[in-house]
Image (cartoon, helix red, strand yellow):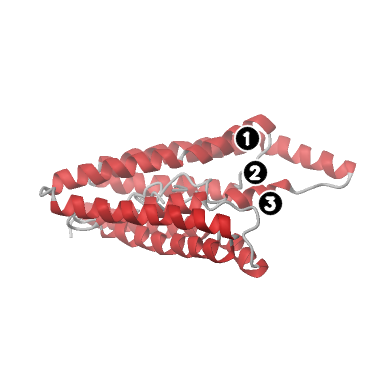
Amino acid sequence: MTSPDIARTVVGIIGNVISLFLFLSPLPTFVQIWKKKSVEQYSPAPYLATLVNCMVWTLYGIPMVHPHSILVVTINGSGTAIELIYVILFLIYSDKKKRLKVLLVLMIELIFITVLTLLVLTIVHSIKKRSAIVGTICILFNIMMYASPLAVMKLVITTKSVEYMPFFLSFASFANGVAWTSYALIRFDPFITIPNGLGTLFGLAQLLLYATYYKSTKRQIAARRAKGGEVDLSEVVVNANNRDSKFGTAPGAAHINANANGRASESMGEDGTS
C-alpha cells in the first residue's frame, strides 16, 4: 500500500467515525418515540431522504461500480441499516394514514434502487460509465438534501438566534465535510469532492453564523428568563430537525449528509456524505 493509499484510508476511517456519529444523532428522538409509542408530530421525510441517499452511495462504492471504495460502502451501508431502523419505527408507531404514506415512499425507494442497480450492472459495461451514472445521481440527491440545512441557516439569520442550530452538530457536519473532501482529493474523485466540498462550505457557514449570533442568543434567552415562563423551543426544533442539519453524507454520507458524502439530517458514504 502506497503512502497516498495509507493517508486515504486513515482519512476515510475518520470520516466513517464522524459520519456514524451524525447518523446516530437522532437516536434520542427515537428513544422518546419508543417510550411514548407514538411518533407524534415528527416527520419521516429526513430519514426517508437519508435512506435512499445512503443506498445510492452504497451502490456507488461497490467494486463493480467504483473500485477501491470500501470505506464508502462501510459507512453508507451502516447508514442504510440505521435509517431503515428509524423508518421501521415510524411504521410501527405512526397512525394508519401516516404509516401508509411512509410505506409507499419506502417501497418507491426500494424499487428505485433495485431498478438502478440492475440497469447499471447489466446494461452499462464500463466501470467509468457506471461510476459517472451513479455518481451523478449521488450528487443530485446530496444537493436536494441541502434544502433543510439552508432553511435552518435562514431561520438563524431571521431570528438572530442559534438556539435552533446546535453547535456540536454544526461542528461535526463541518468536520465530516473536511474529512470526506480530503479523502476524495487524495485520489481525485469528483463525485465525492463536489457534494462534500459544498458540505464543508455550508458547515463553515453554520459555524460562522454561530459565532456571529452566539452573544445575541444569550441575550435573548436572558431576556426571556427575566420575563419568566421561558419556553425552550430549541429542544423541539432540534429534535424535529437534527437529522436535517447535517451537511455531509458519508460519501456519500449530509449531511450532515455521513452520507459518507455529505454524508443532517441531517442531518446525515465514501464521501462521507449521509
Answer with the quarter of the image where residue 30 lies: bottom right
Q: Which of the marked residues, 1 or 3, is nearer the chain's N terminus?
A: 1
Residue sitting at the far right: 227
80 to the left or right of 191: right
Residue sitting at the far top: 158
Query: How far apart are the two marked residues, 2 and 3, measured between alpha carbons?
Result: 8 Å
What residue is rendered at 40% in x and 46% in y?
Answer: 262
Q: Report the amino acid beneath label 3.
A: Glu
Q: Residues within 10 Å of mark 3 (few under 14, many from 20)?
A: some
Residue 209 x, y percent position in the rendering: 59, 35
Residue 57 visible to an observer of this rendering: no
**Image mark for residue 155:** 1
**Image mark for residue 235:** 3
User: What SS does tag 3 mark?
Assistant: helix
User: What SS does tag 1 mark?
Assistant: helix
Answer with the quarter of the image where residue 159 lies: top right
Asked whether the residues under the numbered discs 2 and 1 touch, taking CB atoms below 8 Å apart as contact, a structural biologist would say yes
Residue 130 x, y percent position in the rendering: 18, 47
Residue 22 x, y percent position in the rendering: 49, 55
Q: Report the amino acid beneath label 1.
A: Leu
103 to the left or right of 129: right
132 to the left or right of 221: left
Q: Report the amino acid beneath label 2.
A: Tyr
User: What SS does tag 2 mark?
Assistant: loop
What residue is rendered at 33% in x and 46% in y?
Answer: 182
The foreground one among 263 and 32 is: 32
| Residue picked out by circle 2 | 164
What residue is rendered at 39% in x and 42% in y?
Answer: 142
Quarter of the picture containing the N terminus is: bottom left
Residue 187 visible to an observer of this rendering: yes
Q: Which of the marked residues, 2 or 3, is nearer the chain's N terminus?
A: 2
